[in-house]
Image: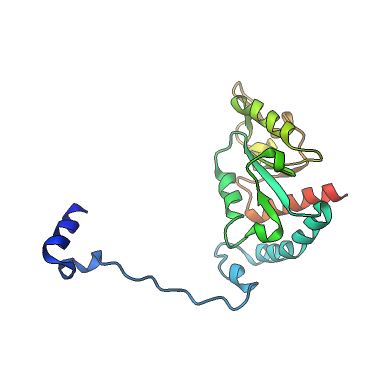
Amino acid sequence: MLYVLKRLLKYGLGTLPRKTLLKTPETPAPYTSEEAAPIAHLGQMDDAEAEELRRLRRELPERIRKAFGRSLHIRHLDAGSSNACEWELTALLNPVYDVQRFGIDFVASPRHADMLVVTGGVTRNLEAAVRSTYEATPDPKLVVAIGDDACGTGLIGPTYAHYGAVDRIIPVDVYVPGNPPTPVAILQGILKAVEKRKG
């Protein structure tokens, strides 16, 4: 980098090798339809999963409004996961899934949450944090266990440092298995939890 700067100062921009010059990125063409934009770029998603996402887009906002009368506030709680499920939860916020248009918001405090989404099996170091987060969440609260470890079917069972499934510490309403589950599976789990609240 220092070599490039010295050469720029001494000889000017025209003396740099071609590969170091920056190219202007090409701007993609705008989308013609709101529905086609995200689905058109779902490289690894098969037709059945894309159709399920379309169904969830139609049903989820209406069911959330009926159950809560407003948007759904979710608090994510990592109880000792490998971060694979966190990647999938983060994918829910990208332009492909964009759960905020469904009326789903992730909040920083359990006191503002309607639902706890727990990833990972509960480690002994985080047991107190899981219990206090659950107790800080106002009633009626929903708990969704995401991933094999949180559901109790993961590779690590109960050991001296690991309790195992989340339901050994706090009650769980919906289990979303997978290692990690897809974002569509997580949305289906959230929908089932919302239906439990309504019914």
* Quadrant the N terminus occupies: bottom left
Q: Is residue 166 above or below residue 57?
A: above
Image coordinates of residue 37 in percent, x first then y, are 59, 71
Q: In the figure, residue 119 lies in which quadrant?
A: top right
Q: Is residue 198 above or below residue 19?
A: above
Q: Tell me the colour scheme of the image.
A: rainbow
Image coordinates of residue 73 in percent, x first then y, are 71, 48
Q: Specify the farthest residue to the left.
A: 10
Q: Is residue 147 above or below residue 61?
A: above
Q: In the figure, residue 71 lies in which quadrant?
A: bottom right
Between 179 and 30, the residue placed more toward the observer is: 30
Image coordinates of residue 38 in percent, x first then y, are 60, 67
Q: Is residue 105 left or right of residue 172?
A: left
Q: Is residue 197 left or right of residue 41?
A: right
Between 89 and 51, the residue placed more toward the observer is: 89
Image coordinates of residue 98 in percent, x first then y, are 62, 60
Count the labels in the image. 0
Q: In the figure, residue 47 lies in which quadrant?
A: bottom right
Q: Specify the farthest residue to the right.
A: 199
The residue that appears at 73% across and 29% down in the rendered structure is 168
The residue that appears at 61% across and 28% down in the rendered structure is 126
The residue that appears at 58% across and 51% down in the rendered structure is 90
